[in-house]
Amino acid sequence: MSKQSSNNPPPEPSGKPVLADNRMLALFAETVEQAPVAISITDDKANILYVNQAFTRVTGYAPEESIGRNESMLSDKNTPKAVYDELWNRIKSQQIWQGYLLNRHKDGRRYLADLTIAPILNDRHETTHYIGMHRDITEMYRLEQRVNQQKVLIETVVDSIPVATVLLDESDRVVLDNKMYKTLSSDLGLSDPARTFIDILREDMAEEWERMKKKKSGFHNREVRFDRGGHHAPRWYACAGSWFCQEDDRVEAFFHENSHTYLLLTLTDITQQKKHAEEIRINALKALMAEEEKTQRLRETLSGAIHHIQGPINLLKAAKTMLTRRGLDDRNIALVDILDQIRSAGEQSVAHMKRCIPESNTSAMTPVNLNQLLHETIVLLTERLLASGIVVEWKPTPVLPALMGQESHLRTMFKQIIENAIEAMNQSGIVTRELRISTWSDKHLLHVSIEDTGPGIPDELRIKVFEPFFSTKNDGHGGHSGTGLTMAQEVINQHLGLIRIDPSYRDGCRVRIQFNIHNMMFVPEKASDHG
Ligand code: FAD
């Protein structure tokens, strides 16, 4: 294409230009001279024969001050002898040595040299020279050390934080954690508790979570209850988190800036405070429940009485109809009159008793944690359970979504079902006395199972037991009004849930309850009585 310059030899078939030997040598010499790395060439005893410009810049020695002298002029006595021995063993066996030496600059200051020494061999494979190449990496080393020290410092500080702390990347992988987090992990028996907490918080906070993440802001004091069941008391954690961005330090991001989002999560164990608060709450509940029980008993007694009076009143009505149909004579008229008076008195009494039935209080709808409710109920009934020698197996799902509901009604309902189980197992002849309560959830439903090892409920009565005033227990003292399960069903109906006796369970009675997680609870305008 273009004319060959007279200085340039014709290209080889490969296309590479071939330079004359001495021009090539000159080019190599110039390249070495200008190379940005300190280069020295020595004889086989390390006596310096040549140094380039960078050598002078790095060591402070001009060529005339270094040529003829030994490389040991750079040595600093702080480098262990073993390092030099290893260096010499390697290069004398005609291998390349690469390592770090502490060198002394001409002005006396020390610097760290990243040095490579390569032997140069003649045709007979004898070492005639060595070529040494080194860079002053003092600054880089210092920075690296500082980074390492900072890392150790950060780790020490993070470790000494008396709260479980964990740093997570965008995929919720743990990047950094502390001792307290490791302790938390073993306490909860979870290999990766942060993931569990994040799942709960993400679900709880929904769009708020994404919004905060986007804004790189944070949250604090989000309480998470963790139920491990069995003999383990529930644990409470106050969670705080803050998102921040960090530039990508990978080489791929050299030309294209990229940043990563991290979440710093702290999990403070507030179980003690919660326990204390729960104790106070349980005591208050005990008083409240005792009061509610009294009211409930009054309601049941009055409803029962109405139920019993209603029967004769109906009979009186029927008798009057019969007499009237037969035709009224003087005697009958007097009788009908008396019957009317009795019926009217009865109806007045019924109306009066109905007015006396205390209304069930309608509590506000709040998010309710069924695990907490059931646990509280077990605690409330502990004395009775112990007195009856009942072993409780409490198996809550560790984390249960909240249910919108009327807390006190739900508590009364669970208490009623558990009391039924206690009574059933208290019957003579029941040797194994176990109460198993478990909770779990799936996508849409919350499930509760309460099973006992009592006599169970016969198949033909599985539906009937929910009817008002029906009781399988006949203790002759009128202690069983037969309204407990009716009330339970009513509460569950109000929460748009389902209750049933599991027909497949044969070792006692198993009550299955389920609620829709996204229930739109039905609250009657006026709570009805069970009469
Ligand atoms: P010694 O380790 O006893 O060395 C003194 C001298 O004795 C050596 O320089 C060498 O001439 C000779 N010698 C020692 N051991 C042997 C052996 N096994 N075989 C042959 N001769 C030996 N050292 C540095 O501290 N900084 C450098 O930047 C550096 N660059 C080097 C570059 C090259 C190309 C070579 C070959 C060596 C280099 N050395 C360097 C090593 C250096 O030669 C010394 O070994 C080292 O400085 C220790 O010196 P010293 O005073 O403790 O004595």
Image (cartoon, grey):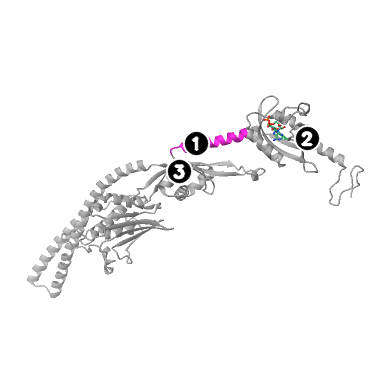
Residue 288 image position (x, y, % from top left): 26, 47
Left or right relative to 316: residue 517? right
Residue 373 image position (x, y, % from top left): 33, 51
Query: Does ligand 1 reach within 8 Å of label 2's beta carbon?
Result: no
Residue 293's tag is none
Residue 315 image position (x, y, % from top left): 16, 68
Q: Earlier in the sequence, mark 1 or mark 2?
A: 2
Residue 122 image position (x, y, % from top left): 79, 41
Residue 9 falls in which quadrant of the image?
A: top right
Q: Which residue was labeled with disc 3?
A: 181
Task: Please identify the residue farthest to the left as the structure is shown.
Answer: 331
Q: Nearer the viewer, residue 377 or 485?
A: 377
| Placement of 383 over or under 468, stated as above or below | above
Q: Which residues are magenta?
A: 141-162
Q: Look at the numbered disc 3 and give the secondary structure of its residue.
A: helix
**143 is within the stretch colored magenta:** yes
Q: Which residue was labeled with disc 1?
A: 156
Label 3 to label 1: alpha-carbon separation:
14 Å
Q: Which residue was labeled with disc 2?
A: 34
Residue 454 falls in which quadrant of the image?
A: bottom left
> Mark 1 belongs to which amino acid?
Thr
